[in-house]
Amino acid sequence: MSLRESLPEKLRGFLRGSRAAGQGAAPRSAASFRNHAGRSDAAGEKVSIRHSRGMEQFFGYIRDQFGLTILDLGGAYQENVSFITGLGHRLYSEDMLTILQETFGVDDFTDQSNPSRIEYFLRQSLDYQDEQFDGVLIWDALEFMAPPLLSATIDRLYRIVKPRSYLLAFFHSQDRPGTVPYYTFRIQDFNSLQVTEYGAHQPAQLFNNRTLEKMFQKYESVKFFLTREHLREVIIKR
């Protein structure tokens, strides 16, 4: 049974599968990326619940509103679907890591400057109308992108998000080359996440505050929160 089929009937109408899977098909979860990459099995996973100031800020913006349209780029997890639709919002879901892996390969950054492949990736993952979304949960998907693809993705996000809306992204705060964990993120509450760590990957580049400010220079503002797990939570205001 697919994830969509396992959801309550009233939730299914809120959720759109990724375009690569076809209209109305079940969304691809981040687990498909992990399994396809062969990084680790369930026994190697590390699960923790932690406070998230970035998520607190994100949901603080939408908490008292109703009928917004939110995009989750981490795949379709029932916890996230239930939480966001339970607030009265419409949720669209894309598994950006799986689409990235299918387009370019795992930890292979050599083809991420190819304009035709970049355009193909954007069509598969972010093919939406201008100013369609009131918020985007990016999670850590941007860490996997080399500069040409990253720049094109950030520009596309700018187009599809409404002015004064918020995006939430995570980046590792390491200051030297090395591997970093893969993560999945499941919403527990307005300010807490279940974070599952599994396997490791080589980031496409290192990200510090100055790098991130330059990346999002078209946006109105960028705000940083550093966690004890060496994850930099970033709230970007469109």
Image (tube, rainbow, N blue to C red):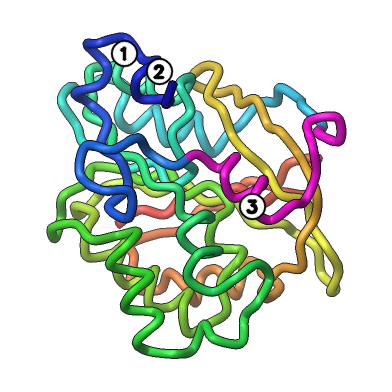
Q: Which kind of residue does numbered mark 2 sit on?
A: Phe
In front of the other: label 3 or label 1?
3
Local crowd at mark 1 within 10 Å, few (<14), some, or many (≥20)?
few
Image vertical order of residue 86 relative to residue 214, above or below:
above
Quadrant in the rendering for residue 70: top left
The front one of 152 and 198 is 198
Q: Main secondary structure of the magenta part?
A: helix
Residue 63 position within the rendered picture, expressed as x and y whole percent measured from the top left:
32, 22
Give left or right: position of 185 versus 166.
right
Q: Earlier in the sequence, mark 2 or mark 3?
A: 3
Looking at the image, which residue is at 36% across and 46% down?
A: 136
Residue 71 position within the rendered picture, expressed as x and y whole percent measured from the top left:
32, 43
Q: Which kind of residue does numbered mark 3 sit on?
A: His
Bounds of the magenta segment: 29-45
Residue 120 position within the rendered picture, expressed as x and y whole percent measured from the top left:
33, 74
Cα separation between marks 2 and 3: 28 Å
Give left or right: position of 231 versus 62.
right
Image vertical order of residue 235 relative to residue 193, above or below:
below
Cα separation between marks 3 and 1: 31 Å
Residue that numbered label 3 is attached to: 36
Q: Secondary structure at mark 3?
A: helix
Residue that numbered label 1 is attached to: 86
In front of the other: label 2 or label 3?
3
The front one of 124 and 230 is 124
Looking at this view, name the residue that lies furthest to the front: 1
Residue that numbered label 2 is attached to: 83
Q: Are marks 1 and 2 in contact (CB under 8 Å)?
A: yes
